[in-house]
Amino acid sequence: MPKNSKAVKRELDDDVTESVKDLLSNEDACDDSFKKSSLIVNNHEGEGKECDVEEGGSDGEEEERPAWNNKIQYILAQVGFSVGLGNVWRFPYLCQKNGGGAYLVPYLILLILIGIPLFFLELAVGQRIRRGSIGVWNYISPRLGGIGFASCIVCFFVALYYNVIISWSLFYFSQSFQQPLPWHECPLIKNKTTTYVVPECDKSSATTYYWYREALNISNSIAEGGGLNWKMTVCLLVAWSMVCLAMIKGIQSSGKVMYFSSLFPYVVLICFLVRALLLKGSVDGIRHMFTPKLEIMLEAKVWREAATQVFFALGLGFGGVIAFSSYNKRDNNCHFDAVLVSFINFFTSVLATLVVFAVLGFKANIMNSKCVALNTNKIVDLLGNGIEESLIPHHINLTQVSQVSSEDYNLMTEIIKRVKEDDYQKLGLESCSIEAELNKAVQGTGLAFIAFTEAMTHFPASPFWSVMFFLMLVNLGLGSMFGTIEGILTPLIDTFKVRKEFLTVGCCVLAFAIGLLFVQRSGNYFVAMFDDYSATLPLLIVVILENVAVAWVYGIDKFFEDLKDMLGFTPYRFYYYMWKYITPTLLLVLLCTSLVQLTMTPPSYSAWIQEEAKEQRLGFPTWGIVVCISLVVMAIMPVPVVFALRYFNVIDENTSGLSTVSYKKGRIIKETARPGEDDDTSLIQGKSPSEAPSPMPGNSIYRKQSGSGGPDADTAPNGRYGIGYLMADMPDMPESDL
């Protein structure tokens, strides 16, 4: 540092802190979660003062904006948020339903056209503006500031029922430390004279009965509340306590949890795959899974479902992506992160699909063997009494039923059917086929808590595998919950300057209280309602508005300049056309098809009828339809409300740019912006650092770089390594007025 700089340094008063060690510099090797940025503020008298710019609380001692300890922690957080339960129990179902291996083609195409561009967009705006979703969209366009509030509401709705699914997994996890597993066989009822199987279990299966009766104790319809299920209430309390403890210190605490919650599911999936491949029939399941049915690819429904899965798999629109990215260094290569996380998500889905169908292939083989044995015994009983012995091929030995293969049984039934064409139905012989078993598509809770649990009962050391599986589900769920809750807390803290600890506890307590709705006996039906109606349409609308706000309102050219300034290189021109034309068009088509599907399909849910021991599709009552519509309306309402308030100047559009707040030594200092500047300027005033005008001498802020050569070497705040914090007197970084 030159001598004249040292002289100025000596003249500074007690407010001078340490030399600048910028969080965003390439040489930064500090691993502290909370880092300060030292700024130079030129006041009207021309006296330079250094102060620490901090943001976070509203009380005296303000907190600095936290930062990730390292890049791995950040990537794990984004992977943990995007990779969730849907990768395990939704993607395999869609893959099986929509053409097997052929489904991967439309999925990959739409991942490139919709997923990666939108994921990159959210990462970029969060990292550049360094605010949560409310602050980001209020900055991009104050009239569209409601987008951030809509994201928060959707996040809250999703968190309400998503944590209930985690509580179900916790319950099964707690019950897995038994040999045999409690859902291994149907319970018996004993009275004075006889012992018999519980009728509901006898008509269904042991795992189905355990899920609906023992775990959920479900009612016959959504109208029958039935009171709280105390077991699930305790599990829900534990689930919210885990989330609260992990999030209470923000990324300082949740970031460390990510090392386990994000990596452990991969360990379990690989272990399951290796174990499943050693079981009989697993290869049949994988072969069935990846046998392409190319003709299905031409159906519009396949592309719509692939687009929907891409959209939700990456967590677009929730605000969690923006929140996590806002804690990044400003020169972080978020384009690389977007591509990396997107493909990690895709390959995780493929890995989960391999595991699911390897296990289901093993289960199908067992079920097929049982079917063959049962029906072969029927044939033995019918010999000489409806079936002639001459119809049985000579190489088949019916004295050893267990030795009869599936091929032998199918050969016998074909011969008998040909000869006894008219009377075949009366014989009661069923068709036994591994393909038929594998074609019984299951998804969601049906896959995790019924089909998969049934398969694990046949595993050697089944309690161990059950513990591992449900612990994996808990971790997958928690990873997504962290991102969802961060999508609520970060924008609210940035906007209203409340303390993180108080807001986190308050949010979790409120969510637990509302969540009691989901742990009553009819709670599963409310989970289905929220899953179907609280997120799908609102998130589609939110992401369309995000895309339009950046590409058309803010300006795609200005956004590209911002990206070049931030990343050090200009992104591929591919993204220009994606953001401006192709992606919003595809999203509008997806929104229209989703609206058509919802209007053509009356609101309904799958109810478990205890007396019949089977599922039945029931329509929602009138109040249920009102709730469904209300969920969509409440989630979207902030967008038109904020737009109207801004448009009619109920809240002045320009006030958000007139003042921003910085903090020094526990005192709030409010700086007034220069007249004539508003929110709609570019993040870098539409200029590269070399073109940007030098700061005005009266109220300028700039960052002093270590090792620089005097005042002329000081750079503008939006330069290549410009500070990412909210800085005093920066009119292009407004506070929300809401």
Image: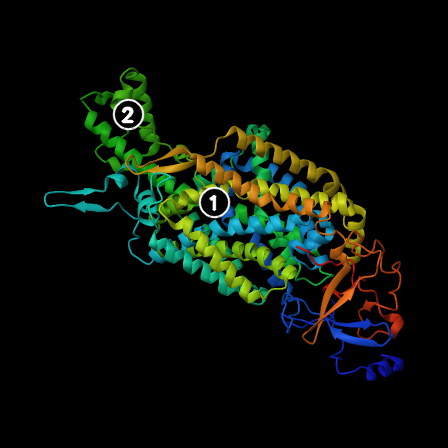
Vertically, is 407 above or below 156? Answer: above
Q: Percent x, y for residue 228?
A: 35, 51
The 10 Å Cα crowd at callout 2, few under 14, some 14 to 19, many 20 or more, is few
> Can you identify the residue that label 1 sits on?
89
Q: How is the image coloured?
A: rainbow
User: At x 73% / y 61%, what residue is drawn?
Assistant: 330
Seen at 49% across and 62% down, the residue is: 244
x, y percentage for residue 319?
61, 52
- Left or right: 27 with respect to 419? right
Q: Earlier in the sequence, mark 2 or mark 1?
A: 1
**Is 120 on the left-hand or right-hand side of 222?**
right
| Of residues 422 and 26, the one drawn nearer to the viewer in this rendering | 26
Visible residue check, residue 259: no
Q: Secondary structure at mark 1?
A: helix
Extreme residue in the left direction: 193
Q: Which residue is at a point 48% across and 57% down the rendered structure image?
A: 510
User: Does residue 403 appear left or right of residue 60 in this picture?
Assistant: left
Asked whether 659 or 334 is in front, the reply is 659
Image position of 165 with respect to 372: above or below: below
Q: Are marks 2 and 1 in contact (CB under 8 Å)?
A: no
Tag 2, which secondary structure?
A: loop
Q: Residues within 10 Å of mark 1 (few under 14, many from 20)?
A: many
Q: Quadrant of residue 292?
A: top right
Q: Which residue is mark 2?
A: 393
Q: Amino acid at mark 1?
A: Trp
The three-letter code of the residue at mark 2 reads Pro
> How many angstroms separate mark 2 from mark 1 (CA)?
43 Å
Q: Given this view, does label 2 or label 1 mark the residue nearer the observer?
A: 1
